[in-house]
Image (cartoon, grey):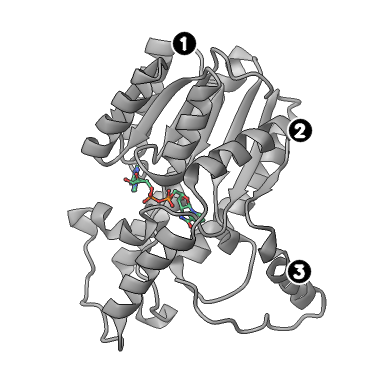
Amino acid sequence: MDDLKGRVAVITGAASGIGLGMARTFAAHGAKLVLADVEAGPLEAARGELERTGAAVIAQQTDVSDRDAVLQLAARASDEFGKVHILCNNAGVSGPAMLPLWETRPSDWQWVLGVNLMGVVHGVQAFVPGMLEHGERGYVVNTASIMGLTAGGGSIYAVSKHAVVRLSEGLNQDLRLRRARIGVSVLCPGLVATRIVESARNRPQHLQPDAPMPNIEGLEARRAMALKFFAESGMPPETVGEIVLEGMRERTFYILTHPQHQGEIEQRFQAISTRSAPPVRAPER
Ligand SMILES: NC(=O)c1ccc[n+]([C@@H]2O[C@H](COP(=O)([O-])OP(=O)(O)OC[C@H]3O[C@@H](n4cnc5c(N)ncnc54)[C@H](O)[C@@H]3O)[C@@H](O)[C@H]2O)c1
């Protein structure tokens, strides 16, 4: 995917963080944008900002865990812009951190897997058939995380991100076997300065925790520290947008933003090849 001018890019989770960073980058390179997000206010603000730069923009409030909503998004994109060329399945939530697996609650799994994994499945199923049909060059970028490539705590978030990596590998294989002109990348960022730590703002009413959070010492203080850490030490989302564009141009399958995590990836490979449990690391989130 070399030239974005006039290409149509769909981005989920586009109202904030990495999604907005990609939208700004793609708009600056002449793409038309279909922005989807569950949060109406920030989505509207993103639409306004990008339109003022001269970009053609559709914004549709969409919950990616809802298959019908994503199908409606695809129908609108096709009605208003004709063809979709780039699909960024990016919407994601961090879920409850710091809980050992045996203390996680059923609704935690439904929420996090519903957005982080099924959101990607819905995006692929709603858009890829149309992209195959028009036959022009296309690209799918699925946002996983560095946590999808490394070992560590058993958080639901990490499980969902490993699944997105494997889903992307499978999607790439299926498209290559068909000789489709659609590239695939899986974006695996490290720390980015976004609102991911505040994901609970988007947890729907019907999936509120089935049981109160167990008492974890210093939980509030750790949350506040995480917020500060993301804001102060995270990569700017616009930089991620540029890295994604470069990755699409180079057809980099695994797009990594933070080379300092290379050692952790290799530790996991090493553990697999020696049939050992991976090394135990301090929890990240
Ligand atoms: N920030 C990081 O350090 C980091 C690192 C690795 C991966 N990621 C991934 O990047 C992606 C983007 O997250 P971010 O860090 O920009 O966080 P963010 O909270 O700033 O942005 C996420 C966006 O997704 C939207 N969203 C949440 N639930 C949704 C739903 N059900 N349907 C549609 N939209 C929904 C939110 O409203 C928000 O606008 C996520 O998949 C996240 O897991 C982030």
Q: Are marks 1 and 2 in contact (CB under 8 Å)?
A: no
Which numbered disc covers residue 177?
2
Kindly indicate the quadrant of the structure image that contains residue 266: bottom right
On screen, residue 88 versus residue 35, left or right, reads right
Which x, y percent locates residue 68?
33, 33
Front one among 101 and 218: 218
Residue 199 seen in render: yes
Label 3's element?
helix
Relative to 195, say whether 119 is above or below.
Answer: above
Which x, y percent locates residue 184?
65, 36
Sequence-wise, the earlier of marks 1 and 2 is 1
Q: Which residue is mark 1?
A: 82
On screen, residue 243 versus residue 112, left or right, reads right
Residue type indicated by callout 2:
Leu
Residue at 44% across, 52% down: 116
Residue at 57% across, 63% down: 147
Q: Residues within 10 Å of mark 3 (few under 14, many from 20)?
A: few
Which x, y percent locates residue 269?
76, 69
Q: Which residue is mark 3?
A: 266
Relative to 37, say whether 214 is above or below.
Answer: below
User: Mark 2 and mark 3: span between their CA atoms?
Assistant: 29 Å
State which mark lies toward you, 1 or 2. 1
Label 1's element?
loop
